[in-house]
Image (spheres, rainbow, N blue to C red):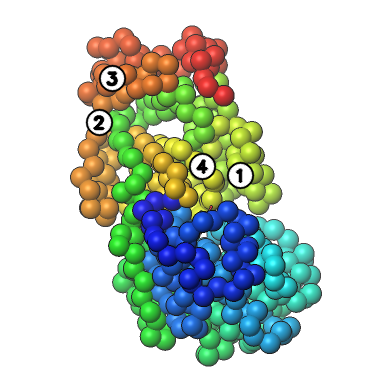
Amino acid sequence: MNNSMSNNTPFSALGLDQTLLQAVADAGYQQPTAIQAKAIPMALTGRDLMASAQTGTGKTASFTLPILQRLSQMRASQNIRALVLVPTRELAIQVLASFQTYGAHTSLKTTAVYGGVDMEQQLLTLQAGVDVLVATPGRLMDMLNRRHVRLDGLRILVLDEADRMLDLGFRDDIAQIMTSVPGKRQNLLFSATFSKEIKQLAHDFMRHPVKIELENPNSAANTVSQSFYPVDQPDKPEILSYLIHGGRWPKVLVFVRTKKAANKVADLLIEDGINAQAIHSDKNQYQRIRTLEDFKDNYFDVLVATDVAARGLDIEQLPLVVNYDLPKVPQDYVHRIGRTGRAGQKGRAISLVNPEEKKLLATIGQLINKSLTIEPLPYFEHGEVREAVINEPPAQSRKKNSRVKPKKRQPSGSSRSAVSKSSRKR
Ligand code: AMP
């Protein structure tokens, strides 16, 4: 995890009961992260809380643990007593998994509802009675409108990745959902940033929230090593393939801006002998979960993803993230590179920057308060960087330097692919 990890408070000092401490120990966590150390004791008091924390900081446990504890201490009821709103189905699935992990020694029931899958099964689970509901706003609105779900017994409401929910246009759905929940409740809001819109949202629905701001909300940006290479747009597939082969990168998450690009880049990598798959919102829910699970289990090496599809993905020990193109929204850059360097691991982010993207690079630099410089492409020997040889965009430098000559694309089996494939570490 990034620098938000360092912290000296033990879990036992946070006010969590033995059952939860046991679950935390079972998960193998030795110390709370910074956000956990600050948010858990505060959330246990029942006060409203807004915390700046992005994925990768351990934020999920900082609301799941207090919710489980507070609900366990309340009288049992048939009602949904905690609702966690999340921007995407992937995140819904992950948050559900956290409740199941940390709540393993409690009798509380949690379920998740999200779009893209049949509503029937979700309704059946809901009707059987749940204590905690994790939901994407769209699917929940659907259910509320059809009167399939009631929230009048709600005691705790969480907005997770609130900034992202606003980016995705869920502002009205959230406002609407607020009209279905009791006024007396605890509110917890987690957001990568406290933008004007987030402050307004907090103002509209929270009561005197305690604010927790970690020293640097963009902390991943400080702990993940970041490189920026100059690449003309048409050369990006070849350079990406060159880097993956040359660096013998074993597992890479590649970000692209569009669904079309995700498919195209995955296909081009496959042509070059690289085991790649794409994930984006045109794939159905089953395919997305399956692809993600296969990636986690190392069935293939390169996952090409759009921002929305990758939002909230928790892939353990992901050493490297590549920005095939820079995101239009600078905050997405922080989210993207936050996929690596998690849970104390070292992380690396590499971005391919075409001349038009230099402006975007400058805005990202402003956001993370760093001067980001474009470096020459590396030259590899046996998977190690030997020296940097390209000082200019590859198209020109290739003519000058034969060593990094990524050849014109050929069907797989081209000489470079064949050589680099055989030398790739598995
Ligand atoms: P999150 O920011 O909630 O998505 O969590 C990021 C990753 O950190 C997940 O894989 C968690 O399982 C892991 N994690 C959460 N809390 C801790 C902790 N205290 N120690 C080590 N890893 C943790």
Quadrant occupied by the C terminus:
top right
Contact between marks 2 and 1 (CB within 8 A): the answer is: no
Disc 3 residue crowd, few under 14, some 14–19, many 20+, Cα 10 Å: few
User: Looking at the rendered structure, which numbered label has been put on residue 375?
Assistant: 2
SS for callout 2: loop
Residue that mark 4 sits on: 317
Which badge, 4 or 2, comes first in the chain's sequence?
Answer: 4
Q: How far apart are marks 4 and 2 (CA)?
A: 26 Å
Q: Distance between the residues labelled 3 and 1?
A: 35 Å
Q: Residue at x 42, y 24 (%)?
A: 247
Q: Distance between the residues labelled 3 and 4?
A: 27 Å
The amino acid marked with disc number 1 is Leu
From this view, report whether residue 18 is shown above or below residue 355.
below
Q: Can residue 137 be seen in this view?
A: no
Q: Which of 222 and 409 is in front in this view?
A: 222
Q: Which of 41 and 358 is in front in this view?
A: 41
Callout 3: CB less than 8 Å from ligand 1: no
Q: How far apart are marks 3 and 2 (CA)?
A: 12 Å
Kindly report which numbered mark, 4 or 1, lies closer to the viewer in this rendering. Answer: 4
Which badge, 3 or 4, comes first in the chain's sequence?
Answer: 4
Location of residue 298 by image quarter: top right
Query: Left of 140 or right of it: where is 48?
Result: left
